[in-house]
């Protein structure tokens, strides 16, 4: 019986929940020296001098190092569309550009000695005025990067212009913010390294072992064969651990320079100002259409905060541009945008990465349009949705979408939520003037997954006992990859699911791979695993033909039992373990060239476009501004589901993060650039207590772009939930004269919006 499409429990969980996993801090070599970083106290300042003498004299200190001691070249932006003059020093050299930027590093025998010694490194600063608002950074004024001579990290090629609204009956305009977020993985960053016999081995919390290997080799001037990177169990990432950070490269260089193993684990406070942040886009939008609700003109301008250095997050407006018009068929769509530097923590690609910003904006604009036109926001959406028969569909801003059934998803979510009944109850509460008002928010979204493309590797090798080892170039950090990939191997080969071991994250074992990011794991890594499994079956038929004394073309394989037989004589069959014994292989090398090992590199035809509809129902206490989410309905379509249980888990986690952005989370700075939400006491990290259960509606619209028909699901819940919750809160107080509230919609912000509306009236 095939496991595909069934709710198989995660095989990863028992070990994680009992004995614990194998994390970087567990794997550091014995006797590893501790690495501690000295970080900037200022957002923007020249470094006049660094005094390390007192720190170097402390007990247990083996060395204190600055940029000039390490010999590592500055890091250039990894994406070609980013300004290549904006190089990042491995440690701040002449200038610091954000609070928390590493300046020096202390190496000690124990962790405590490092903390004590780091406090005695004295840095003399010449303090400068910080630039914190990207809208200010986009103007002529203070330049953060004197070498580049500009704050602009990238300009997105514009599409169209913002004119042409004169013919519209209804026009709405709004400037809004998709606020800065901290990724907050349960495991902070960590690294360990060892230089031995001319080989540098680094253990790293990372989404892409091979990408990290290239970064280490490039930074240290080593050949590829001199570097091994291991990414073991990784305790969460959400995109922020994609790519190597300066600290990880420093740990590697110190291991080589000192010829001693090294280790580093950051504190939570360091993580909040060291791990890349997410979102941070400032949008100005204009939407126009007819009095009947037909949308005819839409323009979006975005200014992206890149932080102090342009990392992967700086290129995200390019993805926002692709998804500008969302699920809607609008006559004319235009876009322009840029990313700029500020004196803040640099940005990574946080869950959704450029796509949530596009969805949040168009959904907010449609609500405003509906209010001004006197129409129901659901009907405005329905009237303008792309139809199923229009796919494949090319948007005006460059997205080449594969498949979609947007109206069906919307109807499913509305029917499950009881939309008409909710509107009736809302009117009753408004008429009664009760303190707890009801709000209903609706969002319909589409996103692009695997936007960058690229191939993925997998191999399957049968062992002497008939079990199998599957290698993947993808990378797991909590999604359930091992379970899903084992399901695919079992289904194609007939090898017992419980006898399949999936491995990832060791560049010495897995020859190549693209890691995880952009919700590409199943559509790339899964398709590669399917290809490797099918190739294995084809090779096994040759072996079976020899054993059964038949032509390979006459051998048939039963995926239910895993046995091979000659066509027409199923009673005479041979199993995987019998085939393995017949080849004489003892302990087959995974990914090797044995008769029962096959590898496959899958190259996709293009990205895929998951979609869905969310309905959020909230209560807002208009006397206090307190919001309670009482129900959330989500219909998220990610194509064919290999394991619906894991899909549910991804949606559940996505909704939690989306709601958290809408209601609680924001990383903030004071006017001097000091972080004021740099720990979990101040940052609005969400817990289960603040979240409701949710209603998930399953829907499958296959994609033709991979053999599984699967799209990505890792980010969808986040993208759909945030605008639905924001709209619901605003809807609850709209009758009081409130038209917009920025995220996060904290009690204070909601209360202030109500009071300001009262004053205005």
Image (spheres, rainbow, N blue to C red):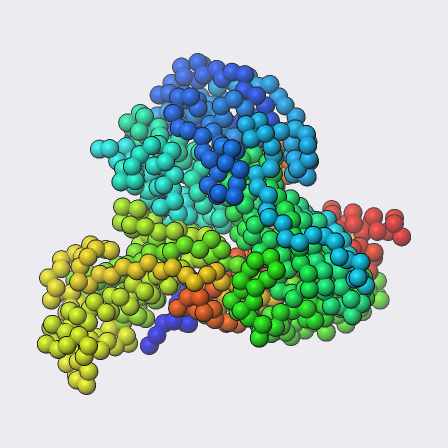
Residue 48 appears in the figure: yes
Q: Is residue 32 left or right of residue 685?
A: left
* Residue 662, above or below 561: above
Residue at 60% in and 53% down: 321
In this view, the residue in front, 139 or 475, is 139
Residue at 16% in and 56% down: 587
Q: Is residue 271 left or right of residue 444?
A: left
Farthest residue to the right: give it. 761
> Would you identify the image quadrant in which residue 362 lies?
bottom right
* Residue 650, above or below 269: below
Q: Position of residue 70 (x, y in %)?
A: 39, 25
Q: Position of residue 698 (x, y in %)?
A: 52, 71
In this view, the residue in front, 540 or 76, is 76
Q: Position of residue 458 (x, y in %)?
A: 31, 58
> Would you identify the image quadrant in which residue 431 lies?
bottom right
Q: Is residue 672 left or right of residue 598?
A: right
- The quadrant of the rendering that contains the N terminus is bottom left
> Would you identify the image quadrant in which residue 109 lies?
top left
Residue at 10% in and 76% down: 549
Farthest residue to the bottom: give it. 568
């Amino acid at each position: 019986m095939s496991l595909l499409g069934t709710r198989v429990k995660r095989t990863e969980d028992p070990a994680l929940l009992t004995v614990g996993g194998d994390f970087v801090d567990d794997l550091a070599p014995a006797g590893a020296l501790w690495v501690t970083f000295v970080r900037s106290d200022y957002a923007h300042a020249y470094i006049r001098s660094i005094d390390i003498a007192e720190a170097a004299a402390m007990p247990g200190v083996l060395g204190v190092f600055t940029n000039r001691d390490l010999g590592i070249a500055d890091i250039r932006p990894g994406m070609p569309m980013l300004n290549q003059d904006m190089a990042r020093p491995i440690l701040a050299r002449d200038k610091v550009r954000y609070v928390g930027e590493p300046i020096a590093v202390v190496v000690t025998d124990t962790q405590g000695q490092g903390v004590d010694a780091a406090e005695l490194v004295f840095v003399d600063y010449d303090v400068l005025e910080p630039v914190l608002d990207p809208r200010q950074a986009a103007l002529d004024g203070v330049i953060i990067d004197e070498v580049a001579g500009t704050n602009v990290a990238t300009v997105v090629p514009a599409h169209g212009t913002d004119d042409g609204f004169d013919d519209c009956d209804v026009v709405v305009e709004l400037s809004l913010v998709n606020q800065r977020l901290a990724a907050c993985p349960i495991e902070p960053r960590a690294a360990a390294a060892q230089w031995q016999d001319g080989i540098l081995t680094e253990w790293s919390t990372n989404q892409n072992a091979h990408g990290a290997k290239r970064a280490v080799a490039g930074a240290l001037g080593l050949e590829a064969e001199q570097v091994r990177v291991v990414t073991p169990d990784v305790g969460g990432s959400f995109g922020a651990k994609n790519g190597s950070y300066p600290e990880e490269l420093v740990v590697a260089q110190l291991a080589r320079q000192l010829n001693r193993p090294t280790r580093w684990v950051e504190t939570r406070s360091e993580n909040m100002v060291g791990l890349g942040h997410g979102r941070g886009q400032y949008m100005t939008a204009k939407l126009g259409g007819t009095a009947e609700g037909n949308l005819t003109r839409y323009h979006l301008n975005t200014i992206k905060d890149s932080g102090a250095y342009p990392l992967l997050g700086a290129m995200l407006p390019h993805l926002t541009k692709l998804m500008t018009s969302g699920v809607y068929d609008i006559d004319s769509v235009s876009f322009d945008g840029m990313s700029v530097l500020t004196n803040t923590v640099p940005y990574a690609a946080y869950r959704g990465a450029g796509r949530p910003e596009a969805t949040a904006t168009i959904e907010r604009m449609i609500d405003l349009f509906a209010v001004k036109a006197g129409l129901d926001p659901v009907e405005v959406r329905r009237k303008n949705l792309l139809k199923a028969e229009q796919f494949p569909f090319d948007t005006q801003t460059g997205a080449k979408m594969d498949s979609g059934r947007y109206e069906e998803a919307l109807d499913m979510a509305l029917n499950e939520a009881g939309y008409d009944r909710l509107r009736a109850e809302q009117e009753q509460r408004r008429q009664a003037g009760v303190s707890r008002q009801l709000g209903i928010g609706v969002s319909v979204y589409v996103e692009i997954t695997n936007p960058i493309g690229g191939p993925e590797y997998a191999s399957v090798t049968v062992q002497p006992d008939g079990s199998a080892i599957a290698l993947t170039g993808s990378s797991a950090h909590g999604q359930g990859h091992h379970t899903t990939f084992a399901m695919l191997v079992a289904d194609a080969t007939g090898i017992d699911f419980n006898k399949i071991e999936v491995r990832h994250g060791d560049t010495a074992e897995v020859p190549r791979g693209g890691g995880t990011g952009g919700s590409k794991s199943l559509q790339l890594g899964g398709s590669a695993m399917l290809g490797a499994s099918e190739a294995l079956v084809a090779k096994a038929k040759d072996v079976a033909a020899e054993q059964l004394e038949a032509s390979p073309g006459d051998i048939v394989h039963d995926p239910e039992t895993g046995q091979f037989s000659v066509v027409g004589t199923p009673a005479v069959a041979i199993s995987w373990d019998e085939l393995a014994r017949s080849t004489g292989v003892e302990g087959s090398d995974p990914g090797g060239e044995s008769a029962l090992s096959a590898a496959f590199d899958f190259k996709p035809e293009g990205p895929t476009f998951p979609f869905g509809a969310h309905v959020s129902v909230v209560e807002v206490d208009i006397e206090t501004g307190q919001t309670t989410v009482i129900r959330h309905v989500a219909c998220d379509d990610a194509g064919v589901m290999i394991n619906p249980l894991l899909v549910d888990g991804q949606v559940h986690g996505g909704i939690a993060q989306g709601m958290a952005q809408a209601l609680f989370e924001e990383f903030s700075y004071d006017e001097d650039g000091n972080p004021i939400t740099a720990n979990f006491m101040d940052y609005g990290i969400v817990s289960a207590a603040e979240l409701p259960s949710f209603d998930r509606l399953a829907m499958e619209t296959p994609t033709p772009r991979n053999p599984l028909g699967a799209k990505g699901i890792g980010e969808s819940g986040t993208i759909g939930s945030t605008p639905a919750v924001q709209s619901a809160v605003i809807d609850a107080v709209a009758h009081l004269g409130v038209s917009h509230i920025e995220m996060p919609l904290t009690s204070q912000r909601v209360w202030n919006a109500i009071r300001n509306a009262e004053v205005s009236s």
